[in-house]
Amino acid sequence: MSGISSFLTNFPPFIYFLLSLLEKIPVKLPIPIEKMVSRVSFARTGRHLQRYDNRGFRLVVGCIPYRYRKTKEEEAASTSIDEEIEVLVISAQNGKGMLFPKGGWEKDESMEEAAIRETLEEAGVLGNIEGKLGKWCYKSKRQSIFHEGHMFPLLVKQELDRWPEKNIRERKWVTVSKAKQECPHLWMREALEELVRRHMRQQEEVNRVACN
């Protein structure tokens, strides 16, 4: 990767570890690795770049990290490609429930870049971001201000052993039903339901094509 030497001179040793690890990932990322790494939380402070809409709503973006896993029946029989979704949830900073990674969308990045950055910062995973699930307006319980949240699915390809918020967040893979039980935010649960509907439509289309 070109320009790494000059890039590394301006960042702490952790960046070197993270960048060297990312270089080994055989996944085609939607944005350059250097650009993504430079956006992690310890390199960005304050909210002077935070985006707001014309109503004064803070714009927030995030991802539902997911993966496919084979059912026990399939593992035993090995006769079908029937798969189900697992999602990655992280602990809330206040310790109340589990949620999906999200944070402020800033002026110097696209919505997708912000979603990828927040997912790397809070959950330590990388993967393929997909089409937006929708947008939701909600009121922050901590700050009593309104937000407009946008969520994307992210098919996880790589889990990092170290990431910026490792020491303050727990992450775990759970079933969709478990995520709905543990997530306290209605708008995130609705985004998860949309992901499940999308997955079901895709499976129906695959089955329809296979039957023709």
Image: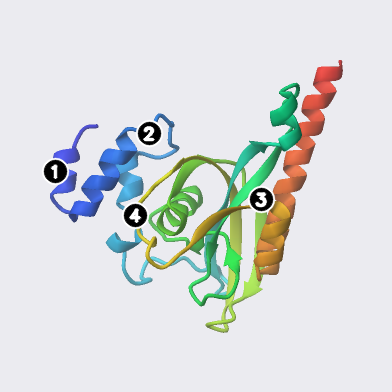
How far apart are labels 1 and 2 at the CA level? 22 Å
User: What's under tag 3, amino acid-wise?
Assistant: Leu
Upstream in sequence: badge 4 or badge 1: 1
Q: Earlier in the sequence, mark 3 or mark 4?
A: 4
Amino acid type, callout 1: Ser
Q: Nearer the viewer, mark 1 or mark 2?
A: 2
Q: Amino acid at mark 4?
A: Arg
Q: Label 2 belongs to which residue?
A: 25
Q: Taking 98 as reference, is 103 left or right?
A: left
Q: Which residue is denoted by mark 3 in the rendering?
A: 133
Instruction: Identify the element where label 2 is drawn.
Output: loop
Q: Residue at x 72, y 36 (%)?
A: 72
- Quadrant where the C terminus is found in the figure: top right
Query: Which of the 4 quarters of the picture holds residue 39?
Result: bottom left
Q: CA distance from mark 4 to mark 2?
A: 19 Å
Front label number (4 vs 2): 2
Kind of element beneath mark 4: loop
Residue at x 24% of width, y 32% of height: 1
Crowdedness near tag 2: few (<14), some (14–19) or many (≥20) residues, C-alpha within 10 Å: few
How far apart marks 4 and 1 lie (CA) works out to 17 Å
Tell me how far mark 3 sits from mark 1, CA to CA. Answer: 38 Å
Q: Earlier in the sequence, mark 4 or mark 2?
A: 2
Q: Position of residue 169 (x, y in %)?
A: 45, 65
Residue type at mark 2?
A: Ile
Crowd tier of the residue under label 4, counting other residues whose Cα lies within 10 Å: few below 14, some 14–19, many 20 or above: some
From the viewer's side, name the closer residue of 140 and 162: 162
Indicate left or right for 42 with 170 as reference. Answer: left
Which numbered disc flags the more N-terminal residue, 2 or 3?
2
Q: Which residue, given by chain and number where applicable, does mark 4 sit on? A: 39
Which residue was labeled with disc 1? 6
